[in-house]
Image: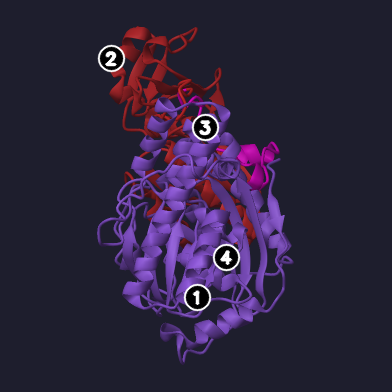
Chain colours: A red, B purple
């Protein structure tokens, strides 16, 4: 399986190239500099491997949730590459990639992944990562107030992601006794996106570039206009 | 599936003439020119557009998906919704444009990097730069207003340089001396609302759905030109700067103090449109006299306004000035003009590296003529 993967949903920007067992990644924590870095990373990896894009099987990308701008960068880059090289795209959950990254950092099997979603909410997902090449979702991903995250039926969870740094107190109070450890430094990387994409691709879950979409989770981003004509549109921060 | 408007351009040899123009223009003089086929992408506001321009064969295709419907209930463009729609629609629009051009390979990709909405620009820049990377062809980030200024070069009889351009749209109102491609001097601009913005806001006051500019113009046709007279802002003082936000307030006051029935709304629309057109023309006349230029180009979305076109034509006849406008679909935001502007710079050897950072604010007069160097090397990092 030959894949190029992109993940830019958080303040980390990364690209990974998977050629069978060979796996290489470029990863940098670079807030607001993803647009300057991501294609350079891809180019370096392909050059180093001496592989043209057209020799790959697919382009994988972190489809979110995460920063609106970030998930659009990953999606648009993947769309451009896929369209030009005539490759299918494999969308991968950025929360699942975070869960896998945390598990690989030595965290264990059951991960509660959280990004800060601002507006006093988190992007939230529970995953089983006992298989090192998978992050099996345990329930739906959602955007939710930290005090209202769904309660898992059992304990032994690892809390992962910067959502646990911003909302740690509230989350721990809500999940009292269910969480064994917290890793606030874990971030989703393209390597994890690639690892998850291999399974997705095998399962036939690839799509044409024009059908690839970010997953924002927060879909209400506007306030309904006032009835008064000419009322200024309001949008929430991305 | 989004509704995409594909336009089959006339093959009229305009491009060849345009190319001859480019050949004699300063920056490109004596440079060996090769034919280039350029994919252009435009996503700076609420139109998702792609086009293919060939420096020999001319415009091969241009496709556009308008988001107007999406933003209507908000009475204006909602940036986050615009960005979301661009990323959902652009690949399909690009595929349409490539298919419309016969599917042959392109030699370069040009995409708008500014000015405009940061998130919206980023979608086109990311997609465009990635396409170029994957194809292994040069890429170029285009200045949206340069593209508007050069749009008339896509017409069968393009104006010769230098010319005065009145660039009027929903986001910009500028009088620009265009000496050559890349040689722009902003002589005057709106200090507050753009003319198109004033049109849309006043249309909203009149109860017309967004974007109301064209609907306001239609309503104005039924209005009595003698009933109300609106001020001509900043025409009683020297200079070429303009102001349009007061006209919207004047319309509101008039509706409140006089009457707000259907005939009165038509009369207000008429008086408003005449005031905007008159003000623009006073400034055009002044700019033509100050600069001694003998050609006037009216471009940008408001350049589609019939009253403005007629008045500019009259001014031209009076002053002996040649007046031209791009056809309406090239006045409003489109990717054909982006492909064309990009092709000039790509031909001159300019290109961008793999960084697709956008420039939501990018002053027009910071541009220089096309030259073989890294375009935008002075680029400041922006949010992205």
Q: Earlier in the sequence, mark 4 or mark 1?
A: 4
Q: Which residue is mark 2?
A: A169
Alpha carbon distance from label 2 to label 4: 61 Å
| Chain of the residue under the numbered disc 3 shown in the image | B
The region drawn magenta spans A197-223
Between A24 and B317, the residue placed more toward the observer is B317
Alpha carbon distance from label 3 to label 2: 61 Å
Q: Residue at x 43, y 55 (%)?
A: B278
Percent position of residue A77, x then y: 52, 51
Q: Which residue is mark 4?
A: B326
2 vs 4, front mark = 4
| Chain of the residue under the numbered disc 4 shown in the image | B
Q: Are marks 2 and 1 in contact (CB under 8 Å)?
A: no
Q: Earlier in the sequence, mark 3 or mark 4?
A: 3
Secondary structure, mark 2, is helix
3 vs 1, front mark = 3
Percent position of residue B258, x then y: 43, 28
């Amino acid at each position: 399986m030959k894949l190029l993967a992109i993940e830019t949903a958080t303040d980390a920007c990364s690209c990974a190239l998977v050629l069978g067992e060979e796996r290489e990644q470029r990863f940098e924590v670079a807030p607001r500099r993803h647009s300057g870095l991501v294609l350079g990373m891809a180019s370096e990896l392909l050059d180093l491997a001496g592989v043209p894009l057209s020799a790959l099987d697919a382009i994988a990308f972190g489809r979110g949730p995460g920063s609106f701008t970030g998930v659009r960068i990953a999606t648009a880059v993947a769309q451009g590459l896929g369209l030009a090289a005539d490759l299918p795209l494999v969308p991968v959950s950025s929360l699942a990639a975070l869960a896998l990254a945390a598990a690989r950092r030595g965290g264990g099997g059951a991960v509660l992944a959280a990004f800060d979603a601002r507006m006093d909410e988190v992007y939230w997902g529970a995953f089983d990562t006992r298989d090192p090449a998978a992050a099996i979702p345990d329930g739906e991903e959602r955007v939710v107030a930290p005090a209202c995250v769904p309660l898992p039926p059992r304990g032994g969870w690892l809390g992962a992601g910067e959502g646990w740094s911003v909302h740690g107190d509230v989350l721990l109070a809500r999940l009292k006794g269910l969480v064994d450890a917290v890793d606030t430094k874990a971030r989703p990387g393209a390597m994890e996106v690639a690892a998850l994409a291999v399974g997705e691709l095998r399962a036939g879950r690839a799509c044409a570039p024009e059908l690839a979409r970010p997953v924002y989770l927060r879909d209400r981003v506007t306030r309904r206009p006032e009835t008064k004509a000419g009322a200024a549109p309001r949008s929430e921060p991305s | 599936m989004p509704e995409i408007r594909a336009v089959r351009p006339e093959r009229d040899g305009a491009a060849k003439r345009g190319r001859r123009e480019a050949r004699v223009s300063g920056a490109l003089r004596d440079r060996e020119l090769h034919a280039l086929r350029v994919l252009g992408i435009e996503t700076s506001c609420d139109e998702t557009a792609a086009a293919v321009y060939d420096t020999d064969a001319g415009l091969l295709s241009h496709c556009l998906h308008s988001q107007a419907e999406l933003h209507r209930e908000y009475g204006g463009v909602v940036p986050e919704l615009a960005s979301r729609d661009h990323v959902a629609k652009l690949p399909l629009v690009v595929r349409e444009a490539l298919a419309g051009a016969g599917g042959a390979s392109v030699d370069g990709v040009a995409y708008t990097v500014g000015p405009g909405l940061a998130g919206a620009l980023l979608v086109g820049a990311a997609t465009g730069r990635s396409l170029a990377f994957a194809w292994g062809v040069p890429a170029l980030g285009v200045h949206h207003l340069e593209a508007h200024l050069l749009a008339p070069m896509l017409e069968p009889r393009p104006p010769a340089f230098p010319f005065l351009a009145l660039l009027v749209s929903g986001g910009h109102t500028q009088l620009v001396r265009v000496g050559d491609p890349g040689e722009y001097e902003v002589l005057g601009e709106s200090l507050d609302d753009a003319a198109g913005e004033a049109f849309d806001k006043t249309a909203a006051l009149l109860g017309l759905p967004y974007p109301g500019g064209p609907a306001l113009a239609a309503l104005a046709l039924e209005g009595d030109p003698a009933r109300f007279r609106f001020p001509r802002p900043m025409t009683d003082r020297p200079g070429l700067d303009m102001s349009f936000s007061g006209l919207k307030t004047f319309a509101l006051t008039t509706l409140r103090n006089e009457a707000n029935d259907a005939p009165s709304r038509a009369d207000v629309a008429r008086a408003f449109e005449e005031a905007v057109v008159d003000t623009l023309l006073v400034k055009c006349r002044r700019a033509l006299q100050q600069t001694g230029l003998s050609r006037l180009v009216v471009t940008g979305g408001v350049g589609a306004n019939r009253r403005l076109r007629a008045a500019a034509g009259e001014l031209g006849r009076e002053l002996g000035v040649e007046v031209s406008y791009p056809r309406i679909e090239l006045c409003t935001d489109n990717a054909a003009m982006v492909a064309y502007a990009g092709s000039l710079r790509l031909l001159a050897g300019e290109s961008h590296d793999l960084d697709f950072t956008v420039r939501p604010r990018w002053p027009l007069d910071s541009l220089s003529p096309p030259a073989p160097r890294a375009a935008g090397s002075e680029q400041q990092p922006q949010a992205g």
